[in-house]
Image: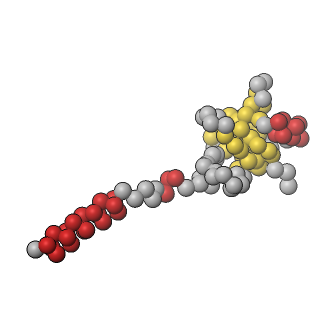
């Protein structure tokens, strides 16, 4: 009787622990979207987009996968923006300072 109770208890405990597993594929880095989670020590993914316009307060509008996204410009990106043609394809990396709007870290020229 004791062995059966111990077996059932272990089975229930393992089932509960398996259900609590937080292996959610949505927490992984997003490669096809305009932003993603980058852990410390990892390089930011390169994002491709089309340069649509520049705003007066150091922001740009880039079209990524058919959606217009507003980004801030870092100091390095501000120096590079003069070389980018309006309507041209750009490759860039981003970072976040903790709010909802990402910042272009740099434009990658190849």
Q: Is residue 45 visible?
A: no
Q: Residue furthest left?
A: 1
For residue 21, say whether it is visible.
Answer: yes
Residue plotted at (49% across, 57% down): 25
Image-based side of 75 in relation to 40, left or right: right
Q: Residue at x 60, y 49 (%)?
A: 37
Residue 20, compared with residue 93, is above or below; it is below
Tell which of 5 and 40 is nearer to you: 5
Query: Residue 74 falls in which quadrant of the image?
Result: top right
Q: Position of residue 84 (x, y in %)?
A: 85, 41
Q: Nearer the viewer, residue 63 or 79?
A: 79
The answer to whether residue 50 is left or right of residue 98 is right
33 and 78: which is toward the camera: 78
The spot of residue 55 in percent (x, y) is 76, 27
- Residue at x 14% of width, y 72% of height: 2
Q: Residue 21's spot in the image, x, y percent? A: 40, 59
The N terminus is located in which quarter? Answer: bottom left
Tell me which residue sits at (61%, 48%) in the image.
36
Q: Quadrant of residue 99?
A: top right
Q: In this view, does 108 lie to the left or right of 61?
A: right
Type of colouring: secondary structure
- Spot occupied by residue 73 in the image (x, y as percentages of width and height): 77, 35
Q: Looking at the image, which residue sits at the far top?
A: 56
* Along the line of sight, the residue nearer the viewer: 51 or 22: 22
Q: How many labels does the image show?
A: 0
Q: In which quarter of the image is the C terminus?
A: bottom right
């Amino acid at each position: 009787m004791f062995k059966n109770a111990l077996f059932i208890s272990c089975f229930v405990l393992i089932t509960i622990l398996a259900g609590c597993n937080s292996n959610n594929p949505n927490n992984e880095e997003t490669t096809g979207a305009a932003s993603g989670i980058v852990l410390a020590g990892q390089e930011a993914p390169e994002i491709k987009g089309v340069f649509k316009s520049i705003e007066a307060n150091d922001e740009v509008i880039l079209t990524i996968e058919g959606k217009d996204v507003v980004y801030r410009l870092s100091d390095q990106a501000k120096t590079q923006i003069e070389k980018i043609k309006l309507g041209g394809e750009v490759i860039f990396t981003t970072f976040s300072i903790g709010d909802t709007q990402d910042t272009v870290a740099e434009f990658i020229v190849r």
